[in-house]
Image (tube, rainbow, N blue to C red):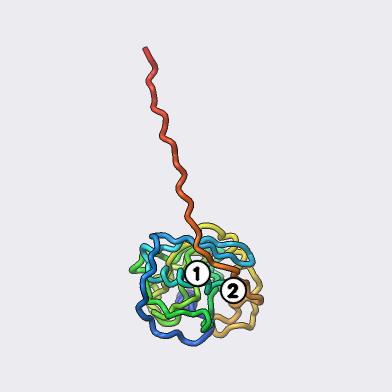
Amino acid sequence: MTKRLLLAALSALALSPAMGAAPKRPVAVAPVPLPDVVRVALTTEAGTIVLDLDHKNAPLTVENFVRYVDQKRFDGIVFYRVMRLAWGPQPNGLIQAGARGDPKRVLKPVAHEPTSQTGILHKAGTISMARLAPGTATADFSILIADMPGLDAGTNPNDPAGYAAFGHVVEGMDVVKKIYDLPLDPVKGEGFMKGQFLAKELKVVSVRRIKIPDAPVVPPAAPIVPPKG
């Protein structure tokens, strides 16, 4: 299998939930009043990852994610998967966490918002929803270690819808990389995902909305007074 075909195959599986029953079809839900950017702190046993979620450009996906945050449904979930790619600038790949189909946590799935619609591309530090078919994303998500354009809409002929990116890391990429470096179990998983699961899952303690600090006030520059004479 060529590198190009392998990347396409990995991209098709890259953000798929690892297990759990297939979610129900997406349904309309009442909108959540949110600002253009929502900041959340994802506190893990390895440290805190701070994310800015782009509500302006990916409203449905962000509102879905924030429901889980506000209802504390993400508290106690785990990072369970690390995909490491051997090519390109290193480190390369992603880490994945979520509810894994837990019926006590999972809400209705959210409609798919492709990158061609949102303009949010899969770059290093991007957070993106895991899914099976488009429109099945619920409570599993990935954070990218490096740019992965194969996850954008229109780049993979086997899955032209791509995945729904909806924000990016603003603090804590060192924590993301720490999770990426955790030991893997070589026998967990099936197919392309075999060997991509953590030997010991990493707990997410809590996920909370936090305030974005106000921009510092820059005092006006003193007027330049020409010298006399």
Q: What residue type is labelled 2?
A: Gly
Percent coordinates x, y for residue 209 in the rendering: 50, 63
Q: Earlier in the sequence, mark 2 or mark 1?
A: 1
Percent coordinates x, y for residue 187 in the rendering: 64, 83
- Determine whether, in the image, residue 157 is placed left or right of residue 95: left
Percent coordinates x, y for residue 59 in the rendering: 37, 67
> Could you say which disc has been placed on residue 44 in the image?
none
Mark yes or no: residue 89 visible: yes
Q: What residue type is labelled 1?
A: Val
Residue found at the far top of this picture: 229
Asked which quadrant contains residue 115, the reply is bottom left
* Residue at the image point whose x is 47% and y is 55% from the top: 212
Q: Name the residue under label 1.
A: 69
Viewer-side residue, 175 vs 65: 65
* Residue at the image point whose x is 53% and y is 60% from the top: 50
Instruction: Give the structural element (helix, strand or loop) at label 1.
Output: helix
